[in-house]
Amino acid sequence: MGGTTIEPTRERLLTVAERLLLESGYDNVSVRAINAAAGANAAAVHYHFGSRDRLVAALLEERWLRLHLLALVLFPDGGWHGIPAGSAWPRGSSCSVPPGRT
């Protein structure tokens, strides 16, 4: 299986999961429902993310990164919610507070 089919499936899973989670809530969305709605193999979520929790973490990380980058463009002086420019969370981090903000 080449890289050209892996990324579209991963992105499709993220997009579908986002829609289903917004519509139904975390507790009401199963891995089976995400795979089915994405038209993916029954094991696709586990193959690409390892678990539903890790899929949700990836979804939040990717959406947060886009929002943060947009905020840095719109507010280059760091005026966005008082978060200094360039203080993005490290990829894969599970911290709930930006670095230096304890």
Image (cartoon, rainbow, N blue to C red):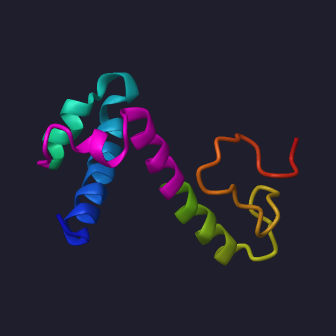
Residue 23 horizontal/vertical position (percent) = 31, 36
Residue 6 horizontal/vertical position (percent) = 24, 61
Judged left or right of residue 93, residue 45 is: left
Q: Which quadrant is the N terminus positioned in?
A: bottom left
Residue 51 horizontal/vertical position (percent) = 37, 34
User: Considering only vertical position in the picture, is 79 above or below 92?
Assistant: below
Q: What is the count of numbered marks? A: 0
Outermost top residue:
27
Judged left or right of residue 2, residue 18 is: right
Judged left or right of residue 70, residue 57 is: left
Judged left or right of residue 8, residue 80 is: right
Using the rendered view, name the quadrant where residue 71 is placed: bottom right
Q: Which quadrant is the C terminus positioned in?
A: top right
Q: Which residues are magenta?
A: 39-62
User: Considering only vertical position in the picture, is 63 above or below 25?
Assistant: below
Q: Is residue 56 magenta?
A: yes
Residue located at (81% from left, 52% from top): 99
Residue located at (17% from left, 48% from top): 38
Residue 2 horizontal/vertical position (percent) = 20, 69
Residue located at (69% from left, 55% from top): 89
User: Considering only vertical position in the picture, is 49 above or below 33?
Assistant: below
How would you classify the magenta stretch by its main secondary structure?
helix
Q: Is residue 9 magenta?
A: no
Residue located at (15% from left, 37% from top): 42
User: Considering only vertical position in the picture, is 25 above or below 40?
Assistant: above
